[in-house]
């Protein structure tokens, strides 16, 4: 199985999750690509494509949205996994997931995951720190990456 993990990472959390996913597929041919900084390899070279981003101001990164919109036809011919990094938990996290990915892609995907998030204050600008502190009441770096969720997500990919 050839796996392409496409993600967008602003502060590094989604990149961490993408790398953890890649490690869980150590016996497979895996490539990770941060869509913000790199050009994509030909999608036809991969039979499985995992797509992930994070929530900023209630939205997934524009480059991820543009990617799945422009490549919907080919994505619907592949095994797909969709993941989201966010600080919300349980129902609130899944409510955000439901909004950021189109219905057609969600129905086609063999794995869905809300895989946790982080507040990395040392990587935020003043405005981001201000907003996070105002919304969450927190002003310290916090990591809530869901390692069990990452394992479950990768297991679903492997078994489907």
Image (cartoon, rainbow, N blue to C red):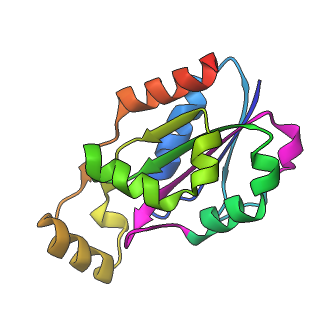
Front residue (pair 151, 104): 104
Q: Residue at x 55, y 23 (%)?
A: 156
Front residue (pair 15, 76): 76
| Rendering coords of residue 62 (x, y %) | 58, 71
Task: Give the quarter of the image for residue 67.
Answer: bottom right
Is 136 drawn above or below residue 131 in the view shown?
above
**Residue found farthest to the left:** 137
Front residue (pair 157, 8): 157
Is 114 drawn above or below residue 23 in the view shown?
below
Query: How many labels, in total?
Result: 0
Task: Give the quarter of the image for residue 152.
Answer: top left
* 160 sits to left or right of 98: right
* 56 sits to left or right of 78: left
Quadrant for the N terminus, please: top right
Q: Residue at x 87, y 49 (%)?
A: 42
Task: Give the quarter of the image for residue 144.
Answer: top left
| Rendering coords of residue 65 (x, y %) | 61, 65
Q: Residue at x 37, y 66 (%)?
A: 123
Is 80 drawn above or below residue 9 in the view shown?
above
Q: Answer whether residue 117 is visible to the viewer in this image.
A: no
Q: What range of the chain is rendered magenta? A: 41-61
| Rendering coords of residue 109 (x, y %) | 61, 39
Front residue (pair 125, 118): 118
| Rendering coords of residue 103 (x, y %) | 57, 53
Q: Residue at x 41, y 62 (%)?
A: 55
Q: Answer whether residue 119 is visible to the viewer in this image.
A: yes
* 94 sits to left or right of 92: right
Quadrant for the C terminus, please: top right
151 is within the stretch colored magenta:
no
């Amino acid at each position: 199985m050839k796996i392409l993990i496409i993600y967008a990472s602003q502060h590094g959390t989604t990149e961490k999750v993408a790398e953890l996913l890649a490690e869980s597929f150590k016996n497979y041919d895996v490539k990770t690509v941060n869509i913000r900084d790199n050009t994509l390899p030909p999608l036809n070279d991969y039979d499985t494509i995992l797509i992930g981003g994070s929530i900023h101001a209630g939205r997934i990164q524009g480059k991820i949205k543009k990617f799945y919109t422009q490549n919907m036809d080919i994505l619907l011919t592949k095994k797909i996994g969709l993941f989201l990094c966010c600080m919300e938990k349980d129902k609130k996290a899944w409510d955000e997931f439901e909004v950021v990915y189109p219905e057609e892609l969600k129905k086609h995907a063999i794995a869905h995951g809300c895989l946790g998030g982080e507040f990395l204050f040392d990587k935020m600008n003043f405005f981001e720190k201000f907003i996070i502190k105002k919304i969450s009441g927190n002003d310290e770096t916090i990591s809530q990456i869901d390692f069990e969720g990452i394992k479950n997500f990768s297991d679903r990919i492997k078994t489907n």
